[in-house]
Amino acid sequence: MNAIPLPGLFLFLLFLILFSGFFSGSETALMTLNRYRLRHRAEQGHKGALLARALLARPDRLIGLILLGNNFVNILASALATIIALRLGGEGAIAVATGLLTLVILIFAEVLPKTLAATYPERLAYPAAFLYTPLLKLLYPLVRSVNWVTNGILHALGAGQRGEQDNALSREELRTLLSEAGAMIPQRSQTMLLAILDLGKVTVEDIMIPRNEVDGIDIRDPEEEIIDRIKNAAYTRLPLFDGDIDNVIGIIHVRDALHTVLDRGLDKEYLREIGRRPYFVPEGTPLYQQLLNFQREKEPVGLVVDEYGDVLGLTTLTDLLEEIVGEFASDPAQTIAEIHQSEDGSLLIDCGISVRELNRALRWKLPTGGPKTLNGLIIEHMEAIPEPGTSLKLGGYAIEIIHTAESAVKTVKYARA
């Protein structure tokens, strides 16, 4: 070292500090890479991503290699700084050189490169992978020895290597990831993806058409009434029942029934024959499972039943798909039939509307874990059937009771701010 001039020693020290910054920054860059973007780039054949992914498959070896290089460079830089200090000022300058070197390494070999690497990880991680891959092969015996000791200590402490499954995202973590995607995913697509995640938490009971609103055909009704119901049906499939909806005979396609009426007039026995076997759905079935059930059974309509076999309502594949993509109505004003705007700008709401549909239409946040309809929510809140003119705050929203019946609240008014 005495034969090397001071400018050469300073230049060598500068290179060591740069190498130290490279090791520190590349470690941060590799460890902060987005694993899903890395996997995507690797599957596209990006060479740097492929090498980085292989290195990160065994992070203990990668960290061992980086720390070996970083510590070696820092110790060599410290020794070199001591030699320079002895030449410049003798033993008294060693303390000053140590302090200056510590400050320089802290700023230029730790904080600065790690900050840049955390901000732009891919710019440093992929080039570094080209260097670390052959370097790991060259120093593998040494790295393996270090890992053997550290892994032994970790296992003794009960902190072994994590498996790949530990990196999997939970449903809520995936929801957060989608919510924070911002402009990377269009708002419409983001809404649909979040709705798909919610299919496992929502049941058919939450979206079904209630029993009292089910449009069907009673085989006991007069012929004229049945024909009129077929001609004016709002749905393509109607349940056919005998006296009561709990006694369902089948599900008839309105088109087939209409052809029957036009060809031969109304034939009740033939209506029974063309009716498809009714498909029953347990009330607590999650929407995701029901979507699979509809696909397996090849049935687009199901009757929701409780544990006693009584029909609670009707659910369709269309209703389920609308939970994902939104209402199919082309005119937004016709999307929610239970909500009407009055002349003064306030909203008149039919209390038979489901809480979930109301939340979606008005962007409210009423609780959905209890009663399924607005009427049920009001009665649960009031613990009685309120009188018309009663005002209350439901979930922070001020509403006024407009019309009630003996057993239910029919209409409420909401004055928008």
Image (cartoon, rainbow, N blue to C red):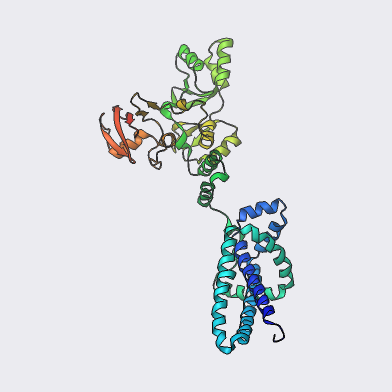
Residue at image location 48% in from the left, 17% down from the top:
229
Kindly indicate the quadrant of the structure image that contains residue 271: top right
Residue at image location 57% in from the left, 31% down from the top:
299
**Image location of residue 315, percent across then percent down:** 49, 32
Above or below 267: residue 326 = below
Residue at image location 74% in from the left, 67% down from the top:
134
Do we see residue 54 in this rendering?
A: no
Q: Is residue 377 left or right of residue 77?
A: left
**Image location of residue 174, percent across then percent down:** 54, 50
The quadrant in which the C terminus is found is: top left
Q: Is residue 336 left or right of residue 38?
A: left
**Image location of residue 395, percent across then percent down:** 34, 41
- Of 356 and 398, nearer the camera is 398
- Of 200 and 76, nearer the camera is 76
Kindly indicate the quadrant of the structure image that contains residue 376: top left
Do we see residue 115 in this rendering?
A: yes
Above or below 303: residue 82 = below
**Image location of residue 121, percent across then percent down:** 61, 59
Residue at image location 60% in from the left, 35% down from the top:
295
